[in-house]
Amino acid sequence: MLKQIRHIIIAVTVLFGSVSCDFDEERDSFIDSENFYQTKAQCIAGLNSCYAPLLSIYTYQYMIVTECTSDLMWVASGDQDAQMDITPARPRFGQNMWTQGYLGVMRSNAAIAGIERCPGIDEETRGQLKAEGVVMRAYYYWFLTSTFGDVPFYTIDVATEEIQEEVMKLGRMPAYDTREYLIKELQRYVPLLDQIRASEVAGNRSGAALGWHLIAKLAQWNKDWETAIDALLNIEDMYGDLSQYNIEDNWFRKKNMPETIFEIQHIWSEGGLKVNGNLAAMVHPTRESGTIYDGVNIPEWGNQKTTWAGTMRPNAYFYIGLQPRVGNDLRAQSNMAWEYNGEPFRNPASTGRPWMGPKFWNPDYYLNQDGNNYKVFRYADAILMLAESYAELKDYDNACKYLNMTRNRAGLPDYRYTTFFKLQEEIRNERARELIGEFQRKYDLVRWDVWYQKTREYQDYNRIKDVMQPCHRYYPIPLTEVIRSGYILDNEEYSRYGL
Amino acid sequence: MKRKCMYILGIWMFLSIPYAMGQQSQTVQGIIKDQTGQVLVGAGIRIVESSEPGTKSNEDGRYTINVAPGQTLQFSYVGYEPKKVLVTSEQTVIDIVFEMSKKQELQEVVVIGYGAVKKEDLTGSVVNVKMDDIKDVPTLSIDNALQGRVAGMDVMSTTGEPGSSATIRIRGTRSITADNEPLIVVDGVMDAVQSIADINATDIEDITILKDASSTAIYGSRGANGVIIITTKKGFNTPKPTIRMKTDYGIAQIPRYLDIMNATEFAQYYNDYAFNSTTFFTDLTPSSPMSDYPFPDPWAHGEGTNWTKAITRVAPYQDQSLSVSGGSNNSAYYSSFGYNNTDGIIRNSGAERYTFRFKVDYDLLKNVKVGYNLSFTKRDQDRNMAAIGGQQPWNAAIYLSPFIGPEDSFNPIYNNGQAINNPMHYINLGTNNEVLQTTGHVGYIQIKPMRNLEIKSQFSHWGTQTHDYRYESSLMPTKSEEEGGTAYRREYDVTTLLSETTASYKFQRNNLHFADALVGFTASDRRYNNLTLQGKGYLIDDNKWNNMNAIADKENYTASSTFEKVVKSSILGRFNYNFRNTYYITFTGRYDMASNFAANQKGGFFPSAAIKWSSKNESFMANISWLDELSFRLSAGRTGNDGIPPYRALGALASSTNGYLFDGSQPLMYYPSRLESKNLTWEKTDSYNAATDISLFRNRVNLTFEAYLSYTRDLLLTPQLPSHTGFSSKYANLGKTRNKGVELSVETRNIASPKFFWRTNFTFMRNKQMVDDIGQYSEVSVFNSYGNNVFMMYGYKAGYPLNALWGLQYEGVWHDQEEIIRNEKTKTYVSAAAAWYKPGYQKYLDVNQSGNIDSEDLIYLGNADPWLQGGLQNTFKYQKLSLGVYVAYSLGGKIYNISEQWLGSGSFSTNQYRYMLDAYHPIRNPNSNLPGAGNIDNLISSRMVHDATYVRLKNVSLGYVFNTKKVTKNIISDVTFTVAGENLYLWKKYNGFDPDVTTAGTSSTLRRIDNGAYPKARTVVFSLQLKY
């Protein structure tokens, strides 16, 4: 009996042993950054993640933020951003920009750090990959500094809790210094990229053109006109004569045309992939019923389009002042619409205010999903930045030369220099005519330090005029972020206005 | 040895007397029952004067024995006072009714963690559920029947959908992110079911609930949420098998509709909207004729579509079960088969379940026993496809205008008209089928190497497979022509290997000192495997999910697979001591190791202790005849909660193919998704319990009163980080919560005669849970309002109850322009936006007088937890008729009617509650404080918060037993007919379907939220039970 018991006890012990007791967790279905970034393909997979936040930034709301709270456009919407009802406690799009912007920064930093230590690539490849990461990082800091002004700046890979603690303690840093750093870094890395037009870069990735363009954007904010010109001339070398590019190729539905420098990629197909935006639902004439769009029967647009109640429209300042219907500007019929195939829309006929035009439309969009690419940066922008930079340097010949490139393409006669201020104003107006609805107007106005005055004067949405304060030139850092940082971050400018 | 010889001698002398008398023997038979009329199987019958072992009652409670007149028969049954009957020569039938005294009831054995104790020796808070009261409840998942029956156990329905399990909180909610559901132990195996719905209720012998730390600390890091121990039936050592067949048929239907408008009323309301509107129908003036209104003749439209009616039906219910049990001298077996089919009251939803169980115990050697237990469950659920309410105002059933017909695919009043998939489209064109298969194998060996020492080793392997099949037809109205169908498949399996070995030793001395000790070792390995496929764009619906590669564009194919593993190991121990059954002390402890915590925080120790004084056993109390028991218990201890997912302590790079588009496709991307958390560990709960057990008047009145206090700390939270680090949160042990409560259970035996029996059970419970600390944040929102500007509706704030409701204070509507102008200065009230400062529009209290609505204007609107809840069971037995009536109640507590954000807000795009007929109208009803038709502001306010109090006639069952032994010549011993009803009547204040609802599911901390819940059915079932 005792023997049997002993056997049984031994058997039990053996069975115990069969259940392993190793308490270390193994990463079976995910990885950590230590064992990643070993090959070029892994580095590219890391870089791919740096682009994803762009899809969350470039939304119809971003259009409201950058265009509809400026002198050019309005949207009669209850949306807080559209009403400029923005305070640290009601940050609205600011929260999105803050989160997505820094998500982009963090991912870019991680990818750059990974590329730097990747053992499986040669130095040339490393340089090119890193350059792409550097361009993306600069892009996100451009968003952040343009939207918030001074913001925390870091380039370290947040890989451990300790580094995270350090980064958490960063407060606002001068945007000027941030831009200086980024310009220098870009100047070092952009030449490593293939010097080709964006439309020729494989996979619609960011390329040298975006890099130079960002240098110029950052330099213009810092009023460093020479640096801007140097960078832009590199773009001119790649793109050549503007007149070879067709105005109508800049319609949002036309994708990756040669003039592009960067655009947000979208796709929508019935049975296929859908990575879409929904801006079209805010720019099309209102669908009343069936295929009737603001009184016009447009069967080719179908009867399944959702048109949101708050529709974006140009301000009177734009459609009467800057780009009237009766003028010779070829771009007017792209930017705005009073009629469709000769049949007038009802609302513009009664109010005079046109709809946004075919540049923004998408005849194929379904419900509220549109597959348009959002135009962000293009060659004409670079040309006008050259004009502006030369003008600021008092090189009026060159300034007029570049200004007339876009004017002539639009069928307008040459501009003749009279005074600096008139030239400056003309370049600014020309940027409006050329680039309306391309996610930049507010940044330009803020950069020129005229945003408050211009918007107050020319914005047609009274709600904005009632509420707007000079501090609204920048978005406040969301209050939740201020609290989370332990008040290291602040919104002093807003406090001054009691917001 | 000497003493033993004396006993034997004494017995021999005693036994020899009757034989010396030399009487003739006669056959005596009878039936043995308890006081409730239940027959007692296996009761012992022996002749006192004989040394023979005697006989036992069979499965019908009947016995036959040969006895000589003048001899005495002794009847005995565990837990009852033995009875002796002197047999006379006339007596051939002796029926016995055992009466259970409190003393004997205390001898009953109660299952606790890793063992069982006599009820009188319990030191912790342990409750045994009366299975008799719930066995006839027509429900797939037995937890739904437990509501209100156990003081301290709050059982709340998730939804009324067939197969949905209840969410259970034992003594409150402690954790914010980790699991709060109690640990479920089936036949000694932890986590042996995926849900209680896996268990066939007729297989359950016993359910025990462990509540305080003293009783749950043996489960260490799993014990903080309380423990439910389920023991299934096993066979008897009787050679003749017992066969039971039970068949239930019934019907279920929706018990009520919401009080919302019909087509005529909605047409009138819409005309008011047209009148109020400043953007549409602007020509209407007070003198406009009816013909100018959008609905010139509202009465012509009649009732219109009652959408709730359209999607619901009268649904059949059936349950079949068959069990066979029996055994031999050294073995016993139990096997059962069950089938349940519960059709849902919403069309095309329902659940089907097959269960099989086989259990065998075998005495291998004199001191060695082995056993094996197999269980199999298959659940096949067609999940509901129709949106009922919630935050889908464009197409959920209750929101749809009565003008939209079941075939319509366009909602003309939403968003200037928009294409919708109405609920009938989802029902007819969608499928969401889930098949769960669970198989458990448990083998054990039990050795008694010496007297009082028992070693038990148990191994179990449990596997559950989940197959999900979903399809959405290409014919869905909102799909574009070439968009095609959407198919989804998921294969998920969880396997657990668990080994548990315990050794227990009993000790007693001089009938004064009693002690027992238990030590044990456990190890478990649990693996989760997941595979999902999703494809969009199937050109033809015929194959559904069965040919997923037939996809139009491979870009629309998404596959994912994951694997997770959790390893745990523990050492546990318990020591009980009592002196003269009067002074008790218990120590319990468990040391746990688990892989899912940070490297230097893997282990944790969870101790507890309890003391008890059973005062009635003191000599000075012996003379108080009306008092049968008075004992006091105190316990304290620490338990843990490890209910967080694995790998959270490790940093990770995640991958995705849903990122940016490069050349028209979305290539792979890898990105940092979380950082290492080096100190992540268990949540800990320290709890204290004080209780008293009282029995009065010959045990006619039994009371248990308990009070408890628990403090939970190191709450696993995801504190929000400044987003500029690129991570907006991380896992950390922060935060504190606190629960306190009182519980009272009362059982009275009002009438206990052999023919008529009436018992009442009453439970009362009250729990208060508070958030003491949530780290650095001022609030954590768990449920937000819908719309462009969201506000917290349910959320945590330090110093407030855990289930707090938040919202704006509704102050009626503006009545005139003067009031609005005055308010510009005072800033007392605030409206949604500039356009809302008009008569007939909603105004709210502007708490911070900012002139804007912001989060500081949200005020605390109450606690979702009830003030008092419990249940009242009355059981009557008159001869062969039995009646059980159960009422569950919950008093106090608040609930948001989320749907009123549209249904009661003046929305012009959805139907309305009928009370909106009394809405503000500038001419007809200028004094109303309800927002005018069309004046919706999408804000949440105190107006939408309701009292969640309810009293429910939850269950009534009426049964009759026919003795069919003679009629069927011993083939069928008896037949029981039962009629049972579930959810028969509900008295409530809430204007939604039912306040007993938690659509947040079982995992969330959030309780009592009605985000478009599946309405609970009213069910009536006829049941027939045969016993062979």
Image (cartoon, rainbow, N blue to C red):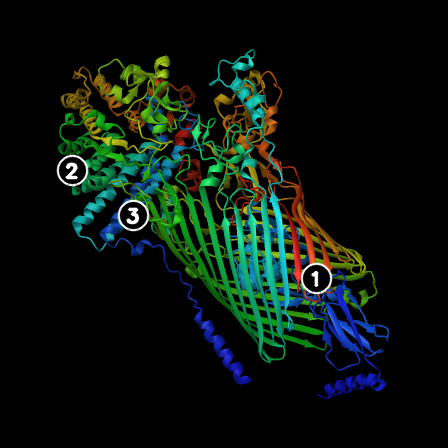
Residue A26, visible in the rendered structure: yes
Q: Residues within 10 Å of mark 3 (few under 14, many from 20)?
A: some
| x and y, in percent, of residue B1008 in the image | 57, 43
* Residue B115 spot, x, y in % from top left: 61, 68
Callout 3–callout 1 Cβ contact below 8 Å = no
Residue at image coords 56%, 56%: B339
> Badge 1 sits on which subunit?
B
Same chain, labels 3 and 2 = no
Q: Which residue is mark 2?
A: A196
Q: Quadrant of residue B582?
A: bottom right
Q: Residue furthest top?
A: B287
The alpha-carbon separation of the residues under discs 3 and 2 comes to 25 Å
Q: Residue at x 26, y 22 (%)?
A: A334
Check disc 3 and give the amino acid type: Leu
At label 2, which amino acid type do we have? Answer: Ile
Q: Identify the chain of the residue marked 3, using the numbered disc in the image.
A: B
Instruction: Look at mark 3 in the image and give the residue it sits on.
Output: B668
Query: From where the camera sits, is residue B615 visible?
Result: no
The C terminus of chain B sits in image quarter: bottom right
User: Where residue A498 sits in the image (x, y, percent)?
Assistant: 45, 27
Q: Chain of mark 2?
A: A
